Amino acid sequence: MPERNVVSWTSMLCGLADAGRICEARGLFKEMPERNVVSWNAMVAGLIKNGDLEEARRVFDEIPEKNVVSWNAMIKGFAENGRMEEARVLFDEMEDRNVITWTTMIAGKVREAEELILGLPFETNHAIWGALLGVCGVAEKNAGIAQHAARRLLELDPLNAPAHVALCNIYAACGKHNEEQKLRKEMGLKGVRKVPGCSWIVLNGNVCVFLSGDKLDPEADEMLLFLSESGGG
């Protein structure tokens, strides 16, 4: 290459990081005669992808002028590795948040909620799994957890209409149309219909189900409180 510019340097850096050659990527980054915010963000993302969160945070702190991508990359790195306290600290420091920032934090808390459920010292019931399903929404990021919650709910209550509808919506949102059609056929065979008095709304990207006269038990109510308190900022 006769003349390298910041774009070509950054492209090479990304390629090395994607291939797992993070030491070479780091060396290349240090050699760059000129860096822009894209270069810095690429280095942070590469370090996170290769599991070096400490070095990623150090590089993040050195970025001269961070943009929303810089913040989101570091927050996402912490959240996806279970370090929600550190993710929350950065989230609180961030001045300009976008939908990706909020989604990342919510997804992290959803994973914490699932871990909380799996570690409960008592047998889980339909209200617990219903609460988790309600906060998952149809976002692809939470699809795995939502599917697990819906399936557990259907194991406990095979004719639960909201769980069937939620799982159909999750499949549709993830492009799993064969699974969606199969489940709809199963609903027909089992005689499952949308329950009268059952309302569905989307609130901040989450699917919320309200049944006439329905009440959550204390455990489910406590979980919703845990998630609502952690979602603010």
Image: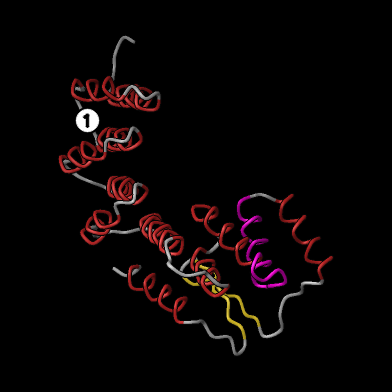
Please give the name of the residue rendered at 36% of the width and 35% of the height, measured from the top-left corner: 49
Range of magenta residues: 155-174
Please give the name of the residue rendered at 65% of the width and 64% of the height, measured from the top-left corner: 155
Residue sitting nearer the eye, 89 or 202? 89
Tally of marks: 1
Picture layout, residue 15 above or below residue 94: above
- Give the amino acid type for the residue marked by disc 1 in the picture: Arg
Task: Give percent across and percent down for residue 41.
Answer: 29, 38
Please give the name of the residue rendered at 30% of the width and 56% of the height, measured from the top-left corner: 84
In the figure, is residue 34 to the left or right of 233? left
Tell me where residue 48 sits by quadrant.
top left
Task: Give percent across and percent down for residue 91.
Answer: 27, 58
Picture layout, residue 213 above or below residue 110: below
Q: Is residue 105 magenta?
A: no
Task: Give percent across and percent down for residue 20.
Answer: 37, 25
Query: Badge 1, how many Cα within 10 Å: few under 14, some, many 20+?
Result: some
In the figure, is residue 136 to the left or right of 71? right
Tell me where residue 6 sits by quadrant.
top left
Secondary structure of the residue carrying numbered label 1: loop
- Residue found at the far right of this picture: 189
